[in-house]
Every structure is written in structure tokens, then in C-alpha cells.
């Protein structure tokens, strides 16, 4: 177990390192002058000189990589071009809103998916099962920003429901929650569809097995068969997916935050793109990538603890 | 599942395949959407009812009418014509992006699966690193620098899709490469080219077809999403993301541009996905891919 943990953490560190190196040399990989790439062709010369110094472009490339990687290790993501504030601080202020959004969406997705999966798995092949299957595939394939836009139209334009946009204040939890409903739902639907299908298939896997038949024979009520015996088999699959889901949700959250004018990492990135403030974009991308790798790592390790079968397998 | 047994053996895609794809309602829907999209994209300007960039200031933000079937946008441009041209732009970006992704993924997957050992480790690590970015985020990092480069959009989306194609290829190659008949043939003196060409490639084709159908809508979604954020295709080009962004700015004045653009995106992604699902059932492929 300890060997596995060490190896898995090692792989995660290598991936993070590759990502950081990639981001620090990106301006050199792309064709064109780095400063022009960052600031656009009509940049003010003073600003350009400033950006050159700030982005460490006068050092050699290996030195730039080292400065950037060691900076990130210390929690220093540089300063933004326009206001010279530390990027880490800007991201630190925005990130909680995005994490809350992603976390609530994920929980919502699981809560929607479980009953749908149970209904489907109870009568596989029935009209209801096929209908839910089609709906799931449907919501999975539609981009989250389309779902978000449609929910926004429905809420504000047709129902005149105002808490649909903005962030609300964390000091007023009720108000904050009211503002969270639609964005979280927009993000949750996709993963609800995905999880419903996953849960359904892993439940069907065990429903035919001997211990389930024995439980039925002993008169264990049906709801316990589905919610306890069958769902348990699905937990490792869901946990494994949560890492991927969280990364995907962070990506989609960018659109959802812009659509619902919510504070968060996405809105910060969107504004930075509009204002050509590259250090913020780079810092935001670093944070999302690191969180994604971390979520996958935690999901893998958690699965080792939850599912004894994995420990017996020979590691890849 | 239906009781019809799927015939196994050598599968040559053709009209038989099309007939089997069209055997279910979702298959018909997927096929119809994709064909319609291709027709609109290929004929493009020849069949749009109006010039997609012509301004009609007197008829701004109007709802559907007999002149403008889907209404007009904030500058009085015909929404239907813009969305039709948008279909062409979406495919002009998504098709090359996915094609590059298929080819690069195929080559990397073949190398990793067939050569194994250190090559395999390196390829898998690189694919993992690419996948450690959600596609949109990778695109943000690159396109915030490249700005309005269409080639940039194509390459970034291609790069984001390489891992999925690479993994599927690698898995297929590994499962075929370990079969006894491949060893036997190698012992008989068959070279790598023959083994890859005759035994490995045909087994990879079906999963790749399915994955292509599944990835095309994601490519359209990512491309339009980026344009919506102001990256990649820029106004006034009638890209779906640009039209959506224009509509979003005036959503309180008229819901129609947002509504119809969302419909175009939803129908397109649904069509490709249903087609992909149907192809997967017909070709009897297990992809096991998580997006």
C-alpha cells in the first residue's frame, strides 16, 4: 500500500511539473514575439518593457522555468500587468466561489443520479429505462453553457426570477444559496446523466449475483436490495470518476460563471482574457490543473481504501 | 436490448452499416442531423436566405417573421443565415481538429501498444499530462496568447483529443498483439508492417469511428464556447459562439438569438452523439472512455 501511495504521488508530481514547465515556456513555443503575444500588437512601449521584466523574459529559458516552478512551489504566481496585485491573492479571493459551485454541483448530480439509476436498474430494457437512457445521453452531449443559457432565459426572461444572476454574499447564506441554484443545476445535469448511466450499469452487474438472490430469498425488502447491496458495488466507480468530474466542472464553471455573472475563477479568467492580462490567465490555469491532478490523486487513493479488491491486484 | 443478433465477422462499413444505423429512432435522428449539417455546411452561402452580414437597422432584434424566419440580431442581421454559415465554420474547425487528433492518437497509440516498454511509458505519461487539463482550460492557456488564430483553435482542440484516440488505439493494439495467431505469423517471418496493417489496424478502425463521432460534437462545443469567451473566431464572423455572445449581450431585449443558437448547438451535439451511440451498438465496440 505504502509503495503504491508513493508511486501514485510521484506520478502526480511529475504531471504537475510537466504542466508547469509547459506553461512557463508556452510564450516561447508559440510563433511571434512573447510580449506582442501577451499584450497585443498595439501595446504601449512602457507597458511592454514592464511586462518583459515582470515575465522574466530577459533571463535564459531554463532560468525562467526554474523561477516560475520555484515561485509556484512557494505560492507565488507573479503579479498582474494592470494593477500589479499578486495573482495568488486574486485567485485566492475568487477560488472559494468556484469550489463551492463545483462541489455543490457534484453533490446535486449524485443526488439526481441515484434515484434515476435505481428506477432504470429495477426494470432494465423497460420503456422508462430506455427513455431515461436517451435523456441521459442527451444532457451529457449538450454543452453546459447551452444548458446554462436556457436556464437563464427560463428564469430571468420568462419567470422574472431575479436571484438568477450575481453571486450573493456569503454573510447571508440564504441569499447565497438562492444565487447558487441555477448555476449549480446547469453544471449538475451533465454529470447527473453520466453518473446515472454509470450507476445503472454497475448495479445491474451485481443484481444477478448470488448474494443478492440470497438476500431476496430471505425476504430483505427491495429498497434495501437496491439502495444498500446494489449501490455499494457502484461506489468505487463513482469515486474514481469524481476526480475527472471535478476537473471538468472547473472548466465548465468558467462559462457558467460568465453567464450568471457570478464571482469566481471563471469570471476572473474571462476578464483577464478580455484585458489581455496574461499572468492571471496563467495563474488560473496552473491552479485548475493542480486541483485536477490533486482530485484524481485523492480519488485513486480513496478507492484503494474503500475497495479491498484493488489492493489485491498487481499494480500496473 | 433487442433480440436481433448482431452479425459478427469482418465488418466493412458501407450501405449495410447505414441501414443498421437507421434501424432505431435515435439512429435516424443522428443520421438526419449530420446529413443536414453537412448539406448546409457544404452549400453554405448558396442557400442562405439573406447575406449573413447584411445589416437591416430598421429590423433589429426582431422575433421570427416571414422575411426573417428566425428573427434578427442586434444589428438587424438575419439569424437563420448566420446560423447556417455558423454550421460551416463549426465543421471547418471541428473536422480538421478531430482528424489531426485521430492521426496523432493513432500513431502514438500504435507506437505505445506495439513497441511497449519505455516508449509505452513515455507516451502514456505525456497523454496523462495532456489530460490533466480540461480541454477548455488548455485552450484558454494557449489561445489567450494566440488570440484570433483559427489554426491555433484547430491545433489546441486536436491536442486535447489526442489522448482519447491514443488510449483507445493502444488498448486495441495490446489486445490484438497478444493473440497467438499474431505470434505465429511473426514466427513465420511476417514483418511489422504486415502485422500492423493486416491484423492490428482493422481492429482499431471500429472504435476510432465511434470515438470520432463522439468527439466531433465536443469539438464543436469547445470551439463555440471559446468564441463565446472571445477566443478563436472573432466577430463579425457568424460563428455560433460569436452569435451566442452577441445575443447574450442583449438577452433582456430579445431572447430569440440566444434561444435559436442554443437550439443549433444542442441539435448538432445531440445528432452526433446519438449517431455515435448507434454506431457503437452496431459495430459492437466497447470504448469505456470517460469523455
Image: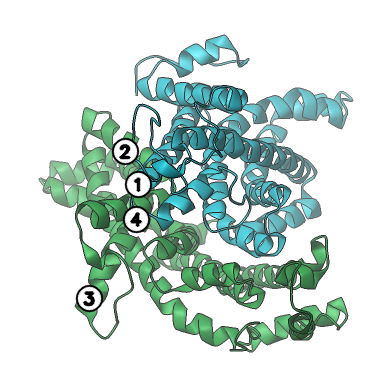
Instruction: Name the chain under label 3.
Output: A
| Discs 2 and 1 lie in a common subunit | yes
Residue B185 in sight from this viewpoint: yes
**Letter of the chain shown green in the rendering:** A
Where does the image place residue B54, in percent across and percent down from the top left?
A: 54, 38
The residue indicated by pointer 3 is A175
How are the colours assigned in the image?
Answer: by chain
Residue named by callout 4: A186
Between residue B128 and residue B263, name the one nearer to us: B263
Q: Are marks 1 and 4 on the same chain?
A: yes
Q: Are marks 2 and 1 in contact (CB under 8 Å)?
A: yes
Question: Mark 1 or 3 closer to N-term?
Answer: 3
The disc, 2 or 1, on the residue closer to the chain's N-terminal end is 2
What is the quadrant of the C terminus of chain A in the image?
A: bottom right
Does dot 3 land on a helix, a strand or a loop?
helix
Disc 2 residue crowd, few under 14, some 14–19, many 20+, Cα 10 Å: few
Residue at mark 4 to residue at mark 2: CA–CA distance: 15 Å
Label 1 marks which chain's residue?
Answer: A
Which mark identifies residue A135? 2
The mark lying in front, picked from 4 and 3, is 3
The chain drawn in cyan is: B
Which is nearer the N-term, disc 2 or disc 3? Answer: 2
Q: Left or right: where does residue A200 sit relative to residue B167? A: left
- The quarter of the picture where the N terminus of chain A appears is bottom right
Local packing at callout 3 (Cα closer than 10 Å; few below 14, some 14-19, many 20+) is: some
Mark 4 vs 3, N-terminal side: 3
Q: Is residue A221 left or right of residue B236?
A: left
| Chain ID, mark 4 | A
Amino acid at each position: 500500500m505504502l509503495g503504491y501511495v508513493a508511486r501514485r504521488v510521484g506520478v502526480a508530481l511529475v504531471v504537475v511539473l510537466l504542466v508547469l514547465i509547459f506553461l512557463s515556456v508556452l510564450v516561447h513555443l508559440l510563433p511571434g514575439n512573447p510580449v506582442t503575444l501577451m499584450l497585443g500588437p498595439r501595446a504601449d512601449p512602457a507597458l511592454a518593457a514592464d511586462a518583459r521584466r515582470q515575465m522574466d523574459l530577459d533571463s535564459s529559458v531554463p532560468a525562467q522555468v526554474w523561477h516560475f516552478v520555484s515561485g509556484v512551489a512557494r505560492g507565488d504566481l507573479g503579479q498582474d500587468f494592470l494593477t500589479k496585485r499578486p495573482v495568488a491573492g486574486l485567485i485566492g479571493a475568487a477560488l472559494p466561489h468556484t469550489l463551492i459551485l463545483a462541489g455543490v454541483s457534484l453533490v446535486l448530480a449524485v443526488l439526481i443520479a441515484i434515484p434515476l439509476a435505481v428506477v432504470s436498474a429495477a426494470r432494465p430494457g423497460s420503456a422508462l429505462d430506455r427513455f431515461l437512457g436517451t435523456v441521459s445521453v442527451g444532457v451529457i452531449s449538450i454543452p453546459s453553457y447551452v444548458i446554462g443559457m436556457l436556464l437563464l432565459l427560463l428564469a430571468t426572461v420568462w419567470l422574472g426570477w431575479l436571484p438568477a444572476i450575481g453571486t450573493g454574499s456569503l454573510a447571508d447564506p440564504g441569499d447565497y444559496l438562492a444565487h447558487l441554484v441555477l448555476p449549480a443545476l446547469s453544471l449538475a445535469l451533465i454529470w447527473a446523466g453520466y453518473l446515472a448511466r454509470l450507476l445503472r450499469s454497475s448495479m445491474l452487474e451485481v443484481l444477478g449475483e448470488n448474494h443478492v438472490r440470497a438476500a431476496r430469498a430471505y425476504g430483505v425488502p427491495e429498497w434495501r436490495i437496491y439502495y444498500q447491496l446494489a449501490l455499494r458495488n457502484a461506489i468505487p466507480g463513482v469515486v474514481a470518476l469524481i476526480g475527472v468530474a471535478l476537473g471538468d466542472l472547473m472548466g465548465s464553471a468558467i462559462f457558467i460563471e460568465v453567464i450568471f455573472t457570478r464571482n469566481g475563477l471563471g469570471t476572473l479568467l474571462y476578464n483577464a482574457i478580455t484585458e489581455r492580462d496574461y499572468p492571471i490567465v496563467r495563474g488560473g490555469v496552473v491552479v485548475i490543473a493542480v486541483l485536477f491532478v490533486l482530485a484524481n490523486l485523492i480519488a485513486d487513493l480513496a478507492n484503494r481504501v474503500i475497495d479491498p479488491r484493488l489492493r489485491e491486484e498487481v499494480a500496473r | 436490448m433487442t433480440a436481433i443478433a448482431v452479425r459478427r465477422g469482418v465488418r466493412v462499413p458501407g450501405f449495410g452499416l447505414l441501414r443498421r444505423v437507421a434501424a432505431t429512432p435515435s439512429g435516424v435522428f443522428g443520421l438526419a442531423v449530420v446529413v443536414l449539417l453537412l448539406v448546409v455546411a457544404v452549400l453554405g452561402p448558396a442557400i442562405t436566405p439573406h447575406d449573413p452580414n447584411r445589416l437591416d437597422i430598421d429590423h433589429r432584434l426582431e422575433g421570427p417573421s416571414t422575411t426573417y424566419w428566425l428573427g434578427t440580431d442586434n444589428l438587424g442581421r438575419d439569424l437563420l443565415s448566420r446560423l447556417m454559415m455558423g454550421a460551416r465554420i463549426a465543421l471547418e474547425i471541428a473536422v480538421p481538429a478531430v482528424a489531426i487528433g485521430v492521426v496523432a492518437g493513432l500513431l502514438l497509440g500504435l507506437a505505445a501498444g506495439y513497441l511497449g516498454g519505455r516508449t509505452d511509458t513515455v507516451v502514456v505519461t505525456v497523454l496523462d499530462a495532456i489530460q490533466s487539463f480540461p480541454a477548455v482550460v488548455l485552450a484558454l492557456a494557449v489561445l489567450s496568447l494566440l488570440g484570433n488564430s483559427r489554426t491555433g483553435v484547430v491545433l489546441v482542440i486536436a491536442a486535447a483529443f489526442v489522448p482519447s484516440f491514443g488510449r483507445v488505439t493502444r488498448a486495441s493494439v495490446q489486445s490484438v498483439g497478444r493473440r497467438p495467431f499474431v505470434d505465429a505469423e511473426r514466427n513465420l517471418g511476417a514483418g511489422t508492417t504486415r502485422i500492423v496493417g493486416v491484423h492490428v489496424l482493422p481492429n482499431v478502425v471500429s472504435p476510432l469511428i465511434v470515438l470520432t463521432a463522439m468527439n466531433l460534437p465536443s469539438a464543436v462545443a469547445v470551439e463555440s464556447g471559446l468564441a463565446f469567451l472571445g477566443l478563436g473566431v472573432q466577430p463579425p464572423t457568424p460563428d455560433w459562439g460569436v452569435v451566442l455572445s452577441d445575443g447574450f449581450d442583449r438577452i433582456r431585449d430579445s431572447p430569440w438569438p440566444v434561444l435559436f443558437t442554443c437550439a443549433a448547438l444542442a441539435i448538432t451535439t445531440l445528432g452526433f452523439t446519438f449517431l455515435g451511440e448507434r454506431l457503437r451498438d452496431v459495430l459492437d465496440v466497447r470504448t469505456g472512455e470517460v469523455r
